[in-house]
Image (tube, rainbow, N blue to C red):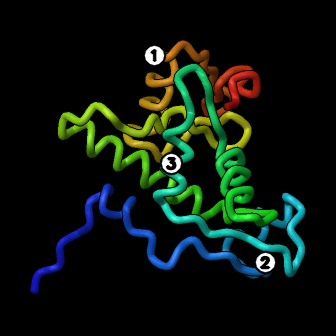
Amino acid sequence: MAYRKKSWREKLRDSGKMPKVLEFDPSFPCGRALQKRGAKPGDLVVLAPPSEVDAVMRSVPKGRLITLDGICERLSQKHGTRFCCTLTTGIFVMIAANAAEEARAEGRKDITPYWRTLKVGGILNDKYPGGAEAHKRLLEAEGFTVARKGSRYCVENYRKFLA
């Protein structure tokens, strides 16, 4: 039987065995990032499914923004944990973005406004479809001011637009 690669939308719907709540272990792939945020061994960490990450992204209205940390905060609250795995959440943000573009290519109008999701610090995501340049154009089309800071793009005063 031939293998068929999953579409982005199929990946978005695939929850695997998530959500999963685990006790934090510094050897987790996201261990260093969570330690910087204050995680200690034994703290509860949620690995939320892609559909929940997508739902948070869809909830951000026009004119507002959210960061990866903001998504993790909402998911942590939802699941009653102190922390959320930033690594899996970041991967699922990228899946949601690609699924949205896949749907747009098929003519669907109701897509996840992934461009309103920024990296930590207001940085644009170069892993989105079309890279940081396309992300910049989508944000500017909604009225945000994007500036280059070193080799990256950032939304100016992004904090005042956080949902």
Q: Nearer the viewer, residue 33 or 24?
A: 24
Measured Cα–Cα span from mark 2 to mark 3: 25 Å
Q: Nearer the viewer, residue 100 or 119?
A: 100
The three-letter amino acid code for the residue at tag 1 is: Ala
Compared across the picture, whether 157 is left or right of 55 comes to right
Say what secondary structure mark 2 lies in.
Answer: loop
The three-letter amino acid code for the residue at tag 2 is: Phe
Say what secondary structure mark 1 lies in.
Answer: helix
Q: Which label number is shown at residue 141? A: 1
Give the mark, 2 or 1, whose residue is nearer the N terminus: 2
Measured Cα–Cα span from mark 2 to mark 1: 40 Å
The residue beneath circle 3 is 55
Compared across the picture, whether 79 is left or right of 90 comes to right
The residue beneath circle 2 is 24
Farthest residue, direction bottom? 1
Q: Are marks 1 and 3 in contact (CB under 8 Å)?
A: no
Asked if residue 31 is positioned above or below residue 69 in the image, the reply reads: below
Give the mark, 1 or 3, whose residue is nearer the N terminus: 3
Farthest residue, direction top? 143
Q: Nearer the viewer, residue 74 or 136?
A: 74
